[in-house]
Image: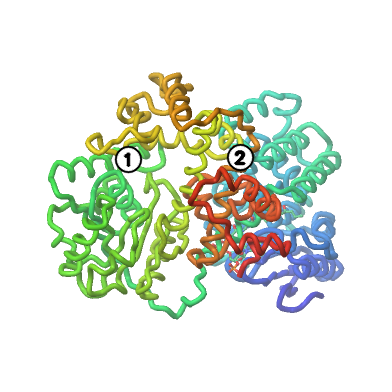
Amino acid sequence: MAEQSVANLTIEGDVAVLTLNSPPVNALSAQVRQGILEGVQNAVANPAVKAVVLICDGRTFIAGADITEFGKPPRAPGLKEAQDAIENASKPVIAAIHGTALGGGLEVALCCHYRVAVPSAKCGLPEVNLGLLPGAGGTQRLPRIVGAAKALEMMTSGQHVGARQCLEMGLVDEIVPEGELRAGAIALARRIVAENRPLKKVRDLSDKMLAARGDASLFADFRKANARKFRGFMAPEYNIRCIEAAVNLPFDEGMKVERELFTELMQGTQSAAQRYVFFAERQVWKIPDIGDDVEQIPVRKVGMIGAGTMGGGIAMNFANVGIPVILVETRQDALDRGLAVVRRNYETTAKRGRLSMEDVEKRMALLSGSLELEALADCDLVIEAVFENMDIKKQVFARLDAICKPGAILASNTSALNVNEIATAVKRPEAVVGMHFFSPANVMRLLEVVRGDKTSKPVVATAMQIGKKIGKIAALSGVCPGFIGNRILRARSLQAQAMLNEGAMPWDIDKVLYDFGMPMGPFAMSDLAGLDIGWARETSTSSTIREVLCEMDRRGQKTSAGYYDYDEQRNARPSPVTEKLIREFAAKAGNAPRTISQQEILERCTYPMINEGARILEEKIALRASDVDIVWINGYGWPVYRGGPMFYADTVGLAQVVAKLKEYAPRLGPEFVLSPLLERLAAEGKRLQDVK
Ligand code: 3H9
């Protein structure tokens, strides 16, 4: 028997109960595998035992393979041995599921002869989110029990499916009341024995798959319908291939396909990136000098200054979790418009079936408006989203200082301004923090929390935790122009603009970045956002391409013309006007246009970003490389299968990045400074992700 604490076998009359206990999530470490193997063997060998229940202590059923073991030498026993012991047992084995049965956990449950769950339990095969496919028979067993169509949905989305739905699909056999799992599972075990029910092996089922056998259209249609969502990712396609194998091949042949494709994914860069991101998403919440003992400030009411696109979007996040928000505007029509936009957003969600009309009303009832800052006096957290101008921000903060109750958090949604300077406007700088949301704020997952020199620990801790509560992923940044995200964006923008002057066209650059996996390139992004952000006709000097485009009223998608021309459906096509303008600018500067290779475009865009990320690390603006990656994945659409710019740099090799940056240096512009940290790590053969 393995260690008592990991797997514990007790005999209750004629039923053996094998309880796993390996916190935090009962992942299938070598010890747990050993515990299952020996536990089942011992139970089966015991003549008094007629059936076996497999159950877990703690917050969840087995949540999957132990991801920390991936990439390390395998340790015996393998999961298959443990699964075989279950599936081939001569006595019925019943999985008793609470929490989440995920990945390898569900694959173990699928080897059991019966499954019972509590109503709050969920099942899923989320391997796709780690750039993988279920590698312990899940790809072959799931379609056999739920059918190919449902398996396609579940395995390519990684979704966790609730117990009731699992019951309907046949994935679980019975649901027992919350808190009665153990007793319910034992009772089911006894019934199975009494009724002499068969030892049901999922591998032998076929009836739900017969319809799909030989019908390639199910798969072709599914691929087509999801092409956009799956773009660039290997794992969804590999999952689909495994389900095709399940449908068309005998079980053991299908298992061979699964093994082969699993191994390929596991050894590839995409899965390494996605596993890295899994841990990065959990690491990002941890702030070394702020422990759990730091007190949080209860946030029961939020004030929002500005009811425009940003303010309204931010307010929705709080209303979504039941926190009331007062929105303050300077004019009644702006306030009315802002609230109407919020209502429209909610109603659109309701029309798509993702929210009930009752919930729309509930959320709207949490939002109120005012034209007076004084209305914010009793708010626990006030966020301003006014015009990006330091003087205006300081005026607002000075007024908030006079109005807000002691202990209130005063947050700025600035995307670039100095939070320390903003804090000089108040007598309580410890209360001032940056909370930088990304547009559209009700959709985008990222929140940059900006810690000023004087921001107190409780304020930082609360800003992070409230971010978690409203479903964001919060990354901590120090103060610098543009913080983590926009500072790196600027490094890319400078190169993209420079390359226009050297002979590349906006669509050449955008295509390279799109093919790399970004949702769009920098010029398409500018057109979407509006070229006139921060531009005014009165002060325009015709000195940049962007200024001249604005002067020509080519202000982006909203005017059907920007860098690109747009048709009525907003489809972009390269613009001869823009092309001519770019050529004229280059000629004026005395630049002879040259052909810039796709490779150079990619390197010129991404390597300066990496360099800027390294500078952000050495200046201690970011706590760790993986936080930089979290920002770029969640705020700017960096493809998760490339792990973020820092992880990507490690996969390219820092020596290569540095060598190229040195080669390109004459073209990189006066602002470019090679990061000493990057240079040192490259020389030492180290990685950015190892910087502590
Ligand atoms: C797989 O199964 C492959 C097989 O098909 C093939 C095998 C041959 N391993 O998320 P939380 C840690 S692939 C190791 O904050 P929650 C996590 O890092 C796997 N560690 O809790 C964190 O550590 P820390 C398929 C893991 O309550 C702590 O547990 N399964 C694993 O918000 C708490 O996690 C999955 O992909 C793991 N598998 O959510 C499921 N899982 O405290 C992955 C978690 O040091 N897990 N940890 O930061 C989850 O989705 C969530 O953790 C879960 C709980 C929903 C279970």
Horizontal and vertical percent for residue 128? 65, 46
Q: Is 23 placed left or right of 34 in the picture? A: left
Residue at the image position 55 percent from the left and 40 percent from the top: 518
Q: Nearer the viewer, residue 16 or 368?
A: 368
Q: CA distance from mark 1 to mark 2?
A: 26 Å
* Colouring method of the image: rainbow
Give the amino acid at mark 2.
Leu
Locate ligand 1 by image quadrant: bottom right
Residue at figure coordinates x 23%, y 65% from the top left: 379
Label 2: which residue? 602
**Upstream in the sequence, badge 1 or badge 2?**
1
Q: Quadrant of residue 674?
A: bottom right
Circle 1 — which element? Answer: loop
Q: Nearer the viewer, residue 129 or 423?
A: 423
Above or below, comparing residue 3 to residue 528 in the picture:
below
Please tell me how crowded label 2 is: few (under 14), some (14-19), or many (20+) other residues with Cα within 10 Å: some
Residue drawn at the location 14% of the way across and 49% of the way down: 330
Kindly check if marks 1 and 2 are in contact, taking CB atoms under 8 A apart as contact.
no
Q: Position of residue 589 (x, y in %)?
A: 46, 32
Residue 326 in which image quadrant: bottom left
Image quadrant where one finds the C terminus: bottom right
Residue sitting nearer the eye, 200 or 506: 506
In this picture, is 667 found above or below 584? below
The residue indicated by pointer 1 is 533
Q: Residue at 72%, 33% (x, y): give it.
A: 209
Describe the element under mark 2 as helix, strand or loop.
helix
Question: For this view, does 183 lie left or right of residue 555?
Answer: right
Residue type marked 1: Ile
> Is residue 185 visible in the rendered structure shown here?
no
Can you give x and y, in whole percent of width and height, for residue 536 in the image? 26, 38
**Compared with residue 653, is residue 35 higher up or lower down, i.e. above or below?**
below
Q: Nearer the viewer, residue 458 or 523?
A: 523
